[in-house]
Each structure stands twice: as structure tokens, then as C-alpha cells.
Image (cartoon, coloured by chain):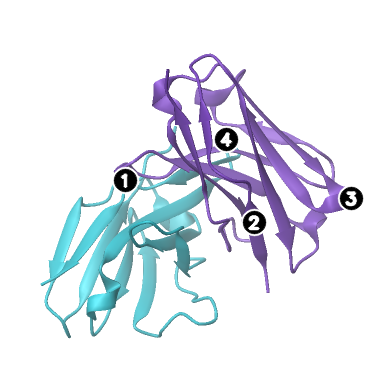
Chain colours: A purple, B cyan
Amino acid sequence: QVQLVQSGAEVKKPGASVKVSCKASGYTFTSYDINWVRQATGQGLEWMGWMNPNSGNTGYAQKFQGRVTMTRNTSISTAYMELSSLRSEDTAVYYCAPRGRFGDLTSWGQGTLVTVSS
Amino acid sequence: SYVLTQPPSVSVAPGQTARITCGGNNIGSKSVHWYQQKPGQAPVLVVYDDSDRPSGIPERFSGSNSGNTATLTISRVEAGDEADYYCQVWDSSSDHQVFGTGTKVTVL
């Protein structure tokens, strides 16, 4: 079955960067775009962007342009999301999810809590 | 940018039917997906492509989409259905995912 295992919780200071990993199994990693979504405590789901694991092509939400970088290592079926210039408002749970052929996010990682605090 | 609007909350008695709407400009022309999220858990896809259910999702969950409104219907509501629900579309014009504002379903 499809499984996405994300890296553990992080605590960062304002201005720092964080890199979250997402290891996929149970399907062909290069067949589906990986999307990243975040959720601040008590808030809704916020889409950050996508990455095509086959080509490495990416598309980012305008809000995160210039601060987010999505990459992958196909040899270990792992996607990465790096967010820089962190501020307190970036404190959230970050999720990865492959996009199905209808645009749906079929399975989700367990989430990674990133806390930004001085 | 494309906007999806949901009611903040819906309350329903056990055994009754809950309907959650998702409004967007000409949303009927798009493929709509629905997610259930319980506290402390990742979202789970419950309906995709307007009205299809992933394997393992009860038939009590159904969806429809027409005009400017998509609807998730939960029949014979159970206590375990209490959760937040989000609609979502892929906006091909911008190549972006768009999520609805979310609806908290409370089972009375």
C-alpha cells in the first residue's frame, strides 16, 4: 500500500531554514507529482506547491515564491521541501501527498511539525 | 485566484444526513475532491472526482457537483464522522491546488 513517511519535528529560530523529507513507498515514485500542504494550529489547509519527481519541475504558490524549494532523490524515493527565512507564522504541520490523475491528493504523510521560535 | 467557500460549521443528529457545500465560480466544470480530517491526524480522501469513493470509504459518503456548488453528503451520520471536511480542486489555469475554507461537522 502507498505509504509516505516524513521526517521528525523541527524547532527553528526566526531567519533559519528547515528541510522536511518525505519517503514514498508502495508505488512508482516518479509517476505522481508530490504536493506539499501546511496547516497552522486551528487553521485550514494551505497548499504550498508541487514537484514532478521524474523531471524535477516545480510549481509554487505565489505566497512562497522565493522562499520554498522542492527537490527529490529518486534513488531513495524521497521528496524534500525546504523553506527559508522562517518566521513565527511558518509554525505549522507540513504534509506531503502525491497527486492522483484527477488532481486529488490520494495519500498523505503523517505530517511534520515545524516550530519557529526565538 | 480561484476561491472555494464552505460553511464554517454543520451540526447534525446521529442517523440524519449532513450536507456540506463548497462554492466556487463554475465549479461544476472542475473535478472536486473532499477530505476528512480528525484532530491530530492527516487528512483522508473521502470523495474524488466529484462523486467517486476511494476503497475503504463507506457508501454513506457521496458527492455531487453542478453549477457553482459542489456538495458532500454524509448519510446516516455516526459519531465517528465528527471531523473537519475540506473540498479541493486543481485549478488548471494556474497549475495550483485550491482548498476550501473547511467545515467542522458536529454530531449532536
Circle 3: is it few (<14), some (14-19), or many (20+) Cα within 10 Å? few
Q: Is residue B78 left or right of residue A92?
A: left
| Marks 3 and 4 in Cβ contact (< 8 Å) | no
| Marks 4 and 1 in Cβ contact (< 8 Å) | no
Q: Secondary structure at mark 2?
A: strand
Name the disc covering residue A75, or none: 3
Q: Quadrant of the N terminus of chain A?
A: bottom right
| Residue A21 percent coordinates (x, y) | 68, 43
The residue lying at 45 percent from left, 59 percent from top is B43
Residues indicated by labels 3 and 4 sit on the same polypeptide chain: no
Residue A100 visible at all: no
- What residue type is disc 4 on? Ser
Q: Is residue A15 left or right of residue A68?
A: left
- Please identify, in this view, whether the residue under mark 4 or under mark 1 is nearer the observer: 1
| Residue B49 percent coordinates (x, y) | 52, 66
- Choose the circle earlier in sequence order: 2 or 3: 2
Name the disc covering residue B94, or none: 4
Q: Quadrant of the C terminus of chain A?
A: top left
| Marks 3 and 1 in Cβ contact (< 8 Å) | no
